[in-house]
Amino acid sequence: MLLRSVVRSLRLTPFALAFGLLAACASAGGRPSAPVNALYGQLDQASKGYETALQQSRAGNLEASQLTLTQSLDQLKAASARCGNTSGCDPQRFFSVFDRLLRLKDGDFDDGQDLNSDVDPSQAALAAGKTGAASLPEAQRSVTLLHGQKLSELIAMNGPVKAALEMWLTQWRPQLMDAYVNYQYLRYQMWPQYQKADLPEALLFGIMAKESGGKVHAVSRSGAAGPLQFMYATGMRFGLGMDNGFDTRFDPAASARANAEYLNEQLGVFNNNLELTIGAYNGGEGRMRRAVGDDTSVSFYDPRVYNQLSQETRDYVPSVLAAAWLFLHPDSYNLRFPRIDGLPGSITLQRPASLSELTVCLGSTAGMEEGWFRTLRNLNPRLDPQVTQPIGSSLQVPKPLERVYASRCVDGPWPILAHDLHTAVVPVVQTPSAPPVQAPVVRKDRHYKVRRGDTLISIVRDLHCSSVQEVTEMNGLKHHKLAVGQTLKLPVCQ
């Protein structure tokens, strides 16, 4: 329990104060004053104390570790809070220590210990999708690896990522929360595909949060489709296509498998450079390869690469990494994801119903204030939500809804109300039919040689189907003048 206390103690309250006063405590330049040096000294001592606490914990001396940790954190809190009132204090130093402690948390604990209090314990028992199957292991978010490398060491906490963190915590926060809820119900389908491919779960969440927000049926203006937004041609290359009229890009498990295969392919191309790989996923591997050339160790932010990419890709990469980072460390950024019981379940319809009708009768049960429509669609992607499914149909639902369905959607007023609303007749307004379009008269041209005594008016009169203006325009005549022997183009009258 000591390790869980470590994380709880590291929540952002003291740091939020320091970060909120960035402008006030910007460095004044020159040599730091004695008060500032004193604060920096306390910061260094707190950091060293944290490492000492980790060493004591590994040695089994939990009581001493807890005492050292408490003293170090109290010192860090006090120093960071005073930074805002001390002229010349640089808050970036405090942020750097905070960032370093998070990275220590991500990799320096014993494998048998779980430091992460951000993990919802209810997710530990997620089933593999079939009754009696082995449960999914809980995501080891405190030690998450990418091909043996610590993910936390691959995410540079630079300006673009920090800016993306702020966006996720402010303007994009609703999408982030929706993505988390949607993902928890899809996790049992998607996470095993990443696990098999040796890819971190946080990366899967980051891509999905940015691409679709966890909406399985999302389609972009460019034609990318599904929770991970595959273009049709790319999807085909990785085994996504039509299956009995269903586009498997909308299948969460198949989409996650294809996404994992794509990322591993590109990680191989770019020598495990995560930023370049994510950029290739958004902007196209061909464009990224041309920008990078032979030097796969080059930074995504190197002007030689960065300046050749679209603004969308420049924003996309740090946004994905920031979402992944928040997935790992929500409490450390004053963010609390809701607890979701994502255990998979199923129901067998006892009366005909569509997904829309089930949404009405389920209401906001189990604390789902926004209703269950999105979740039911995500879990049953092959079904049209408006089409009534017959008795005996099996539908995928979250486990807690099995009992709710039996108590609320089989008998009683709610299924009757839902059916009545679903079968409501909307008047069809007959739009007046447009008058038939007259087919244009196609006229062929013939030629006429002007004879003595002819005038333009006499020629047109003999045609019975044209006008002086039409003949004039056809021949480019000026002032209606004709010359004997001149050849005119005349319309052929039907």
Image: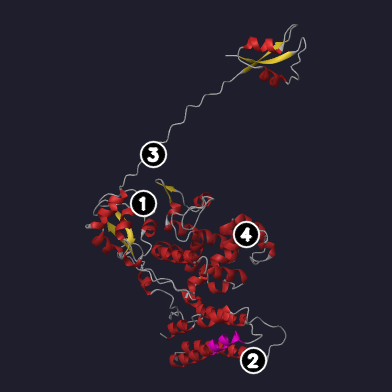
Is residue 176 visible in the rendered image? The answer is: yes
Residue bearing mark 2: 35
Q: Is residue 131 left or right of residue 165?
A: left
Give the alpha-carbon distance from disc 4 to disc 1, as whole Å.
Answer: 36 Å
Task: Identify which amino acid the numbered label 1 is placed on.
Answer: Pro
Q: Which segment is the magenta one?
A: 75-85
Task: Identify which amino acid the numbered label 3 is placed on.
Answer: Val
For label 4, the SS is helix
Please check the rendered image and state whether residue 187 is part of the magenta-colored stretch, yes or no.
no
Residue bearing mark 4: 311
Q: Mark number for residue 128?
A: none
Viewer-closest of 391 and 56: 391
Determine the image quadrant of residue 149.
Answer: bottom right
- Looking at marks 3 and 1 on the same chain, the residue that comes earlier in the sequence is marked by 1
Nearer mark to the viewer, of 2 and 4: 2
Give the alpha-carbon distance from disc 4 to disc 3, as whole Å.
Answer: 46 Å
Residue drawn at point x = 37 percent, y = 40 percent:
428
Give the alpha-carbon distance from disc 1 to disc 2, as whole Å.
Answer: 65 Å
Residue drawn at point x = 44 percent, y = 58 percent:
215
Q: Mark number for residue 429?
A: 3
Say if 187 sits above or below 20 in the image: above
